[in-house]
């Protein structure tokens, strides 16, 4: 039985086409949700967001009706709060929930969801082994490449996959993981604010906002980068910077990376131009023009961000160290590193005051 | 007449006399065009054409030295800013360039010169000038049969080993062309590749180049308490089979001469491989292969062998061309201003017998030029040069080639230009 008809299935996978159709068929109004009979749904909707914020994971509850209806509601809360950090965190948390459920799902149902909801070209793998290994599915390489590049383990690299005639051979847990990534990206799409909400919902949103702000403050996300701290630079950027300061020229890609990094952490155009003045073929006007372009002062007005770690690796600019584990972007490294340093300093201060008091 | 005017007139005549040869790309209205010219150095881009005839008219009227179009499809290709164009998708392009393939002839025919201090040398240009450290280095790259043949074999390899069997791309979705200079381009046009992101394209690049390949994930591992070594079979598909096949190829071609230039510790290990050559070839061609049957070859030595095999098996493509989803690429059927050769579209079958120095020549007639410093070269069945500071009468295609390369000029006294185009 490939189709998803049972309500418990819809509740497990509220992102599917079928679930969405079912919800639409109920013809609910936002105002309806404010009535007392939906209080369980409201609670669960709020809880989904809280779970995402606090645990980074949304649990699975057995009450099908509540579980299903609370999904669009939670999304409504997130969209109303309109915060990038929350949007991402919620998307990740929901995708983890889906990942766990999908990994235990029947083959036919998995294929059904993948092809109906995501439009993937996926089939059951032939029942023969490839060098002693059995696979569950074959997935069109184009669908595979829509999400697999976001995973950074070498296991996910296409070059390490069994690929034949345009199809990647996968196991069930691989497909579940890819689908959960697809869900994450769907949830990260901005939907825009809903028009007018009844007071009950507004109140919930206000309470969630307080929680969100506290969480962000704890993680040090509420302010910019503060003063530039060279000790906190990722190793790739440090190398580009020291090469430049030493008057060694660096490649075009490296120059772009360094400039966009420095601009993004709050350095001024003048300061960045000054750094490049050490290079032998320095041309102040040209450099200034390029730096201003990257800073978004010229050209299309786009402020550029540095390339991702993946891209830097492709261009041979990666200088990985132990803190780079799980980091996908140089700016993330910088932020983590700043936080790490401020934690250490805070601890030191606490310790010193304690010592003084003693 | 100066060189630029001479070449421009020739290109103009070519485009005027052969309008039917110019093939506009598919979905012309969604493509951005870019051009370079003989008389100024600016690149004109963000142009769009509604109909084939407009493009042909433009070429006749302006006679650009080089013609490019976007592999991407845009809603508004002629908008001046990239973010206004509305990106809709992009063909999958591969560039196989002799620049990225090691050939021994380069040190003979390629030259570079530092524009800051004037120092120069032969071979591939250094990233920085060894004398002054400057990065403005001009280079003159020559074309020869060896380089272009290497690029052609690489092109066939990319198509026949990777695109068709592994990536499942249909032959009719693939078009190949000679770039008119040092290599070949492969265009893949299909609805499914159109939507590939830059990241996805980078994964395809890494797949073809074998970047990040872990042999263990292709079955080379020790199993069980006995730590028996197992590995892929030459009959396997994808990289598995390729690894096995190329290990056999690497080992069968391995000889003492080759090992000599290796580092000491590698040399020692490769000598073991050489000694076991026949055994390796016997065991690995069994089905299933017996990777574990050779006591002298442990898993680490196998990994070294596989690394070498992957190096032989990979396809040498130029990354940025494939990864950039907004790039402009030469228009097949146009002329290449670096040589005057045609950017020649080729089927996979035609590629086998294609001779760029014969089959992409479009000019007929004779022309006397003043050759400044010209390495030997061939056009059609004739070989020319080397010439140093010499006035020579050449077939027009050969003369155009030297003028485009900037290694010859129109003699000052010359007034009679082009009669026999």
Image (tube, coloured by chain):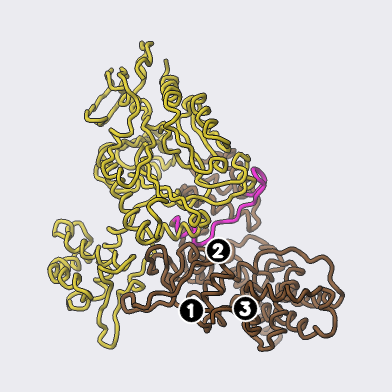
Q: In the picture, which quadrant includes the C terminus of chain A? A: bottom right
Packing grade of label 1 (10 A; few <14, some 14-19, many >=20) is some
Q: Nearer the viewer, residue B75 or A224?
A: B75
Residue that badge 1 annotates: A173
Disc on the earlier residue, 1 or 3: 3
Look at 41% across and 22% down and name the residue there. B10
Residue that badge 3 annotates: A13
Please report, as a chain letter, where disc 2 is located. A
* For discs 1 and 3, the disc positioned in front in the rendered view: 3
Q: Nearer the viewer, residue B280 or A64?
A: A64
Find out whether the residues at labels 1 and 3 contact each other: C-beta distance under 8 Å. Answer: no
Q: Nearer the viewer, residue B119 or A66?
A: A66
Look at 43% across and 74% down and name the residue there. A170
Element type at mark 2: loop
Q: In the picture, which quadrant includes the N terminus of chain A? A: bottom right
B188 horizontally vs A275: left or right: left
Q: Which residues are magenta?
A: A295-315
* For discs 1 and 2, the disc positioned in front in the rendered view: 1
Corner quadrant of residue B296:
bottom left
Chain B, colour shown:
yellow
Packing grade of label 3 (10 A; few <14, some 14-19, many >=20) is many
Are the residues flagged by discs 1 and 3 from a single subunit?
yes
């Amino acid at each position: 039985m490939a189709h998803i008809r049972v309500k418990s299935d819809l509740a497990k996978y509220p992102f599917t086409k079928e679930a969405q159709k079912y919800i639409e068929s109920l013809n609910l109004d936002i105002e309806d949700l404010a009535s007392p009979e939906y209080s369980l749904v409201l609670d669960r909707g709020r809880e989904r967001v809280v779970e995402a914020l606090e645990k980074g994971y949304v649990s699975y509850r057995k009450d099908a009706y509540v579980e299903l209806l609370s999904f669009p509601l939670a999304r409504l809360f997130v969209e109303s709060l309109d915060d990038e950090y929350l949007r991402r965190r919620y998307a990740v948390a929901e995708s983890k929930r889906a990942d766990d459920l999908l990994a235990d799902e029947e083959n036919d149902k998995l294929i059904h969801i993948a092809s109906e909801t995501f439009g993937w070209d996926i089939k059951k793998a032939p029942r023969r082994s490839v060098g002693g290994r059995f696979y569950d599915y074959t997935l069109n390489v184009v669908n595979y490449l829509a999400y697999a590049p976001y995973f950074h383990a070498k296991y996910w690299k296409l070059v390490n996959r069994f690929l034949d005639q345009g199809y990647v051979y996968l196991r069930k847990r691989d497909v579940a993981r890819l689908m959960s990534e697809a869900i994450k990206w769907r949830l990260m799409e901005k939907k825009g604010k809903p028009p007018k909400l009844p007071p009950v919902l507004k109140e919930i949103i206000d309470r969630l906002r307080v929680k969100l702000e506290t969480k962000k403050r704890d993680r040090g996300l509420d302010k910019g980068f503060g003063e530039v701290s060279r000790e906190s630079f990722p190793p790739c950027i440090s190398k580009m910077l020291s090469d430049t300061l030493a008057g060694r020229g660096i490649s075009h890609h490296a120059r772009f990376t360094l400039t966009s990094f420095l601009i993004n952490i709050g350095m001024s155009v003048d300061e960045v131009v000054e750094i490049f003045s050490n290079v032998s073929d320095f041309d102040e006007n040209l450099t200034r023009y390029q730096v201003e372009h990257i800073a978004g002062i010229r050209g299309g007005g786009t402020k550029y961000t540095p390339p991702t770690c993946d891209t830097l690796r492709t261009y041979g600019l990666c200088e990985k160290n132990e803190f780079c584990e799980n980091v996908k972007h140089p700016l993330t490294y910088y932020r983590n590193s700043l936080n790490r340093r401020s934690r250490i300093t805070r601890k030191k201060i606490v310790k010193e005051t304690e010592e003084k008091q003693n | 007449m100066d060189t630029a005017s001479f070449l421009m007139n020739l290109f103009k005549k070519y485009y005027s006399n052969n309008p039917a040869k110019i093939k506009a790309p598919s979905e012309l209205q969604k493509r951005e065009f870019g051009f370079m010219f003989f008389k100024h150095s600016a690149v004109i881009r963000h142009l769009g054409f509604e109909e084939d005839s407009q493009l042909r008219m433009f070429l006749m009227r302006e006679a650009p030295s080089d013609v490019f179009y976007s592999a991407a499809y845009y809603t508004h290709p002629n908008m001046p800013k990239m973010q206004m164009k509305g990106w809709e998708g992009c063909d999958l392009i591969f560039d196989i360039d002799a620049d990225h393939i090691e050939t021994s002839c380069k040190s003979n025919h390629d030259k570079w010169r530092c524009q800051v201090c004037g120092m120069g040398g032969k071979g591939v240009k250094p990233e920085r000038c060894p004398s002054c450290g400057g990065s403005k280095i001009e280079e003159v790259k020559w074309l020869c049969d060896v380089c272009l043949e290497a690029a052609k074999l690489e092109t066939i390899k990319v198509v026949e080993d990777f695109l068709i069997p592994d990536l499942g791309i249909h032959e009719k979705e693939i078009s190949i062309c000679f770039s008119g200079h040092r290599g070949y381009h492969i265009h893949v046009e299909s609805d499914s590749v159109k939507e590939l992101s830059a990241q996805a394209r980078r994964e395809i690049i890494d797949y073809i180049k074998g970047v990040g390949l872990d042999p263990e994930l292709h079955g080379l591992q020790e199993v069980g308490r006995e730590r028996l070594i197992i590995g892929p079979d030459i009959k396997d598909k994808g990289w598995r089979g390729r690894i096995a096949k190329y290990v056999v190829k690497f080992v069968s071609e391995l000889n003492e001469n080759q090992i000599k230039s290796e580092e000491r510790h590698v040399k020692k290990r490769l000598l073991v491989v050489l000694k076991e050559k026949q055994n390796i070839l016997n065991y690995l061609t069994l089905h299933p292969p017996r990777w574990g049957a050779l006591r002298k070859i442990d898993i680490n030595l196998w990994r070294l062998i596989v690394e070498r095999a992957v190096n032989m098996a990979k396809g040498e493509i130029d990354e940025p061309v494939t990864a950039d989803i907004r790039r402009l690429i030469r228009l097949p059927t146009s002329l290449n201003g670096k040589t005057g050769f045609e950017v020649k579209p080729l089927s996979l079958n035609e590629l086998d017998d294609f001779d760029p120095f014969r089959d992409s020549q479009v000019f007929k007639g004779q022309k006397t030029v003043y050759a400044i410093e010209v390495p030997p070269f061939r056009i059609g069945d004739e070989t020319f040069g080397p010439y140093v500071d010499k006035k020579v009468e050449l077939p027009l295609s050969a003369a155009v080639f030297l003028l485009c390369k900037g290694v010859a000029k129109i003699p000052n006294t010359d007034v009679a230009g082009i009669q026999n185009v």
